[in-house]
Amino acid sequence: MKRYIFSLALSATSLICLAQANISPAKKQSKTIAITGATVHVGNGTVIENGTILFGNGKIISVTANGQVPQDDVLRIVATGKHIYPGFIAATTNLGLTEIEAVKATLDFQEIGDFNSHIRSIVAYNTDSKVPATLRSNGILMAQPTPQGGTVSGSSSVVQLDAWNWEDAVIKTDDAMHVTWPVTPRFRGGFGGFGRPQQSPEALAERTQAAIAQLTSFFAEAKAYSEMGKPEVINTRFEAMKKVFAGSEKLFIAADSQKDIVAAVNFAKKFGITPVITGADEAYLIIDFLKDNNITLVVKQPHALPNNNDDDVNMPYKNAAVLANAGLNVVLSIDGYWQQRNLPFMAGTVTAWGLDKEKALSTITLNAAKAMGIDKTAGSIEAGKDATFFISAGDALDMRTNKVEQAFIQGRDINLDNLHKQLDKKFSDKYAAEKK
């Protein structure tokens, strides 16, 4: 028995040692810094050649072309021939809420039940995760950890990816409430009828309408609750909805088909809300409707299959370009968490399918910041905003030339080391030694 207890203790100690973080968050900016000579991609469509960025106390002081650098106590970084980009923003991700997909104890992004408006992803955000450091090395410096599951999943928050704890990480708490629009399952066919739904199409459609009715009832009750003043009994689910009706928290609704997008937008309008639509596979079919209602779209990654069997096979690649070129505010996202490091390359793919490169950059910077309500402090390299940007040796939207050499989050010069780089060095050293 003693031997068994000792073995358990030893195993626990080993796990703790493996879990210890080896990359500390950067210290607060202590000296004013000037970066000169680089091509500055502002994030709003503007490009400044031979630009100079001056920043101090975590804020951008000025961004100029051929700017003069003050001589008094300013640290100067010469970046001639390099490119500077605003920190990329990973939208609607479960980053920091999950670590190892096969280990249930590390999954903290979904709750039981259909109406979980009281759930807040920020309190579960894990700053000790090994994944964010791998994202920073490709320029992703901010993210929107988002709860999933059910009809009303809960509130996301926006974080920066270099922090000791979630309180340090947060840029904006409870930026958006997330809803998944009820849809009727579709059957695509199969061998011998395998995979066919157990209910008839009529029964499935009836179930969907019942779910929409429940969602409508929930919002109606929550709105009435928000207008009560101070209730005698607190309803935590309805209490969490107050900011949505007050307009201080966005409403993100996941919907893909044109019919569901229209229904979701009209649903939100009944409650005086302009929603952000996520997914939006068939948004290109109803562009005028979306423009008339001033809808922001968070579209999926272009590396995907078409939504329908008879769709243009290249539609996922063209979707963001078609929507953005039509004048809509478009944000680009990727499902999951570990693949978020490929976000800039997805934006690069979009440029190959019809979208101007600087507009593609906006889909993962300023447009994302606008959708999350943080554009006054983030999303572009402009005076007065947070000094959150990075220096790349080449085009950051191209995986061949994206080489992040230095990155700053709120003025702090962050450590760009990560587990991938450490393993690369470890085994490079191993096989180099064996060749001798």
Image (spheres, helix red, strand yellow):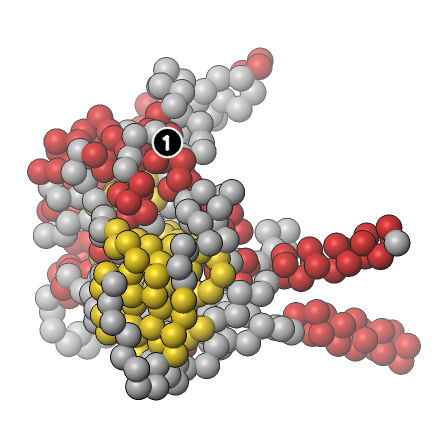
Q: Image quadrant for the C terminus?
A: bottom right
Judge from the rendering whether residue 381 lies leftward or rightward of residue 85; answer left or right. left
* Labels in figure, total: 1
Taking the spot 67% from the left edge, 62% from the top edge, the residue there is 422
In x, y percent, where is residue 342? 48, 46
Q: Is residue 260 visible?
A: no
Within 10 Å of disc 1 (Cα), the crowding (few <14, some 14-19, many 20+) is few
| 157 vs 193, nearest the viewer | 157
In x, y percent, where is residue 102? 64, 51
| 35 vs 297, nearest the viewer | 35
Task: Place residue 194 in its image quadrant.
Answer: top right
Residue 36, compared with residue 113, is above or below; it is below
Furthest residue toward top: 192
In x, y percent, where is residue 242? 19, 65
Q: Is residue 396 visible?
A: yes
- Which kind of residue does numbered mark 1 sit on? Ala
Residue 404, compared with residue 267, is above or below; it is below
Residue receiving disc 1 = 352
Taking the spot 37% from the left edge, 31% from the top edge, the residue there is 352
Q: Image quadrant for the N terminus?
A: bottom right
Residue 343, compared with residue 38, is above or below; it is above
In x, y percent, where is residue 203? 35, 27
Taking the spot 41% from the left edge, 82% from the top edge, the residue there is 28
Taking the spot 45% from the left edge, 33% from the top edge, the residue there is 303
**In terms of secondary structure, where does tag 1 sit?**
loop
| 54 vs 262, nearest the viewer | 54
